[in-house]
Image (cartoon, helix red, strand yellow):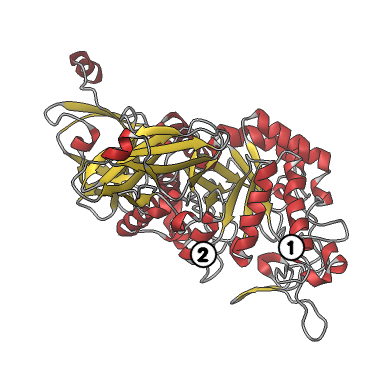
Amino acid sequence: MTRQSRVVIEKVSPQIDGGRFPIKRIVGDNVVVRADVFADGHDDVVAVLLYRNAKAKLWHEIKMTPLGNDRWVGAFKIAIPADYFYTVRGYDQQSLDKKDGLTYDKALRVSVERQRAGFSSWYEFFPRSWSATPGQHGTFKDCQRLLPEISRMGFDVVYLPPIHPIGKTNRKGRNNAKVCAPGDPGSPWAIGSKDGGHKAIEPALGTIKEFKDFVKKARKYDMEVALDLAFQCAPDHPYVKAHPAWFNWRPDGTIQYAENPPKKYEDIVPINFNTQDQRGLRDELKSIVLFWARRGIRIFRVDNPHTKPFSFWEWLIAQVKQVYPDVIFLSEAFTRPKVMYRLAKCGFSQSYTYFTWRNTKKEFIEYMTELTQTEVAEYFRPNFWPNTPDILPEHLARGGRPAFIVRAVLAATLSSNFGIYGPAFELCVAKPLPDKEEYLDSEKYEIKQWDWNKPGHIKDILARLNKIRKENPGLHLTRNIRFCQTDNEHLLCYYKATGDLANIILVVINLDPYHVQSGWLQVPLDELGIDKSKSYLVRDLLNDDEYFWQGEKSYIQLDPQSSPAHILRVSRQSPREQDYDYFL
């Protein structure tokens, strides 16, 4: 007779929806596993964490540590760029002697991605606005001259809106006008014309070879090019004639255009994912991603993924990663929280967020707590954008240059992934459409001529921010954030640190772009391993000022016009006596 195990294993975490979806990590991350492991009677039990990478057959074993009340914890490190599996085994005294324990009934998966999935700085621009000749349409050749400056600012992902032929039927005019004027270029998101569809390039931008040259040149500056993946079509996209079953048609025989009430997109027709030809549609859409991956693209920003089936994304991402496991997908889904989270579970590497609409100290703390201290942190990687071509939030429209600096510091230090739509952001462009959070004279509908060195730009500040991010590993993570107390509701303070406290970054921000704000900051010295009786050095990485602090309270005053934020690197070492002589 087989002996029935007395061991019980429950509440293994992390696991997402009972193991239905994997947790997410990048190479070098730790996976901390907890479980309830106990047995009936009075015998002691032993809990063991088992893990292996997907390329290995044998499991590694780590003895777990008791936390009390039958709760156990263990951890392992992601060492190679491959998915991992983990589970828990429990032994009572009898099974330990026989090395015959009870193993949890699920092998849980870790989806492992490369470093840039977890830490990246994105810069978005419209290539057509960068012709060397005013009034002309920019090309990929023109845009090569931008790469040194984007690199100098410290960005490592260059994101381009759709580069495909733009439809002429129902083409939008300036400021989303229903009728376009002669010469209006139309919205790049209205994809497809007689010149081709999603596998073609807008002729005015250049050739496929010139695009590949642009990608190659970006790599020389250690930057990757990200493409917009917008699964939608202009009415004159070749798909409309070749595959009419992939679209929705009205009773009068006209094609149904896209709507997101109250907005109407007469220049775009949505794809019908309920078509009878689902296999043909899905295979074709997959072929688009593979087409560009074969031409060197490994990052895709996906437009409006929440308007397509979850099952489609889960299938597509898995299919693509079988061929190109290093592909990164960013979900642009400004929609309901549970929908955004489900898309992340389906495989999206990064996700847009509600950061743009968080303004008060309370809102930031609550939102960051949700993103980093709940189960969400296991599968949802936020990417913070202060602006987009569609979104000019009120605080930027009203707050002037200080507001842009504050939002840049927030985005770059709250999240390990952030991005900006430029050069509107670094030039502090702040003219909205009346009563809307949208740009007046939006670049979505016209070709701009930018003066990149216009007085008042914040390019140097962005360069400083990205340098700080790269040089301080405490900022390479999002979920390590901890908030500190201040006695002023306009002062937000938090720190990020490496696990060994070798790198500690303390950020203090004045959320009020109009007035000087001051107050007392409570520094959590015990958490930071700093002796309360000794002074310690903090250096402001934004301006190189240095201060000696002592004790748990420090006085902060921030003028939004001159210095709206501190990014302080904290040294746990007490300064030497000669250091005082130097600074005095």
Mark linked to residue 99: none
Residue 392 in view: no
**Tally of marks:** 2
Secondary structure at badge 2 equals helix
Depicted 497 relative to depicted 360: above or below: above
Q: Secondary structure at mark 1?
A: loop
Residue lying at the far bottom of the rendered structure:
251
In the displayed orientation, state which residue is furthest to the front: 1
- Give the image location of residue 225, x and y in percent: 66, 41
Task: Decide if residue 431 is on the left or right side of residue 147.
Answer: left
> Going by the picture, which residue comes out furthest to the top?
578
Q: Position of residue 388 (x, y in %)?
A: 56, 55
Q: Quadrant of residue 65?
A: top left
Q: Is residue 573 above or below residue 496?
A: above
Q: Residues within 10 Å of mark 1 (few under 14, many from 20)?
A: many
Q: Position of residue 223 (x, y in %)?
A: 62, 35
Nearest to the observer: residue 54 or residue 4: 4
Residue at x 27% of width, y 48% of height: 38
Residue at the left extreme? 533
Instruction: Give me the C-alpha separation between circle 1 and circle 2.
Output: 25 Å
Q: Taking the image as drawn, is residue 354 in sight? A: yes
Question: What residue sits 57% from the left and 55% below the top?
Answer: 331
Name the residue that disc number 2 marks. Answer: 339
Question: Which one is nearer the viewer's eye here, 10 or 527?
Answer: 10
Q: Which callout, 1 or 2, points to the residue nearer the camera?
A: 2
Q: Amino acid at mark 2?
A: Val
Which amino acid type is shown beneath numbered disc 1? Answer: Ala
Badge 2: residue crowd in 10 Å (few <14, some 14–19, many ≥20)? some
**Residue 475 image point, x, y percent:** 41, 37
For marks 1 and 2 on the same chain, the one whose residue lies earlier in the sequence: 1
Q: Name the residue that disc number 1 marks.
A: 190
